[in-house]
Amino acid sequence: MLRRLRKFALIIIAAGAGVLIGRWAAKSRARSKAGEDPLKLDKEDLEISPQDMAPGVIAAFRVGEPPWSWLHIPGWLAAFGTNFAVTAVGGDLDRLREVAEEYGLSFLGFDTETDFDDIAETESNTAGEGTTRFETTENGSTNRSSSSAPIGD
């Protein structure tokens, strides 16, 4: 009983620390972009609500269930890491997705500025003009045939 209470207290402390440090990291990044002192700490940064701590506490209790149990992550670390990630990056998910797409697609050799615009333009120009049929031959290869007439004509 005392062991579970101590474990729960450690999870709550780690979840709170994750919220505080994550919020500080997010605000220091915003202050740095604005040209202010990034190490400044405001009183409002120290306020924690139960909604802020919920993701980490839930993650801490889920680490004992498969497939997470296979990783052997302690509950307090899951609480800290989850809350840190949610509060540090939570508002910038669109920017994070944009950067990941840009680097991922450029790594694969795509030009992110023109390739998708050209594809979308080509698809909109050819919409409804015809059909493409795929046929599988006896040896397993696929033949592709296009026609400009709609199906059924």
Image: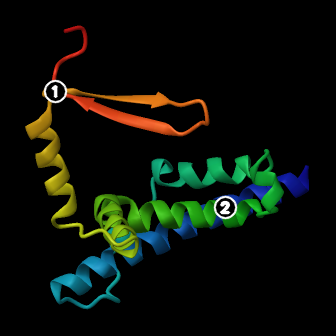
- For image coordinates 35% across by 66% down, the residue present is 96
Check disc 2 and give the amino acid type: Ala
> Which of the labelled discs sits on residue 78, or is there none?
2
**Which residue does the numbered mark 1 point to in the structure image?**
148
Check disc 1 and give the amino acid type: Ser
Q: Would you call the spot at circle 2 few (<14 residues within 10 Å), some (14-19), or many (20 or more)?
A: many
- For image coordinates 21% across by 83% down, the residue present is 33
Q: Would you call the spot at circle 1 few (<14 residues within 10 Å), some (14-19), or many (20 or more)?
A: few
Residue toward you, 127 or 36? 127
x, y percent for residue 148: 16, 26
Q: Is residue 147 visible?
A: yes
- For image coordinates 45% across by 53% down, the residue present is 49
x, y percent for residue 114: 16, 64
* 1 lies left or right of 25: right
Residue toward you, 98 or 30? 98
Q: Is residue 47 visible?
A: no
Q: Which quadrant would the C terminus be assigned to in this image?
A: top left
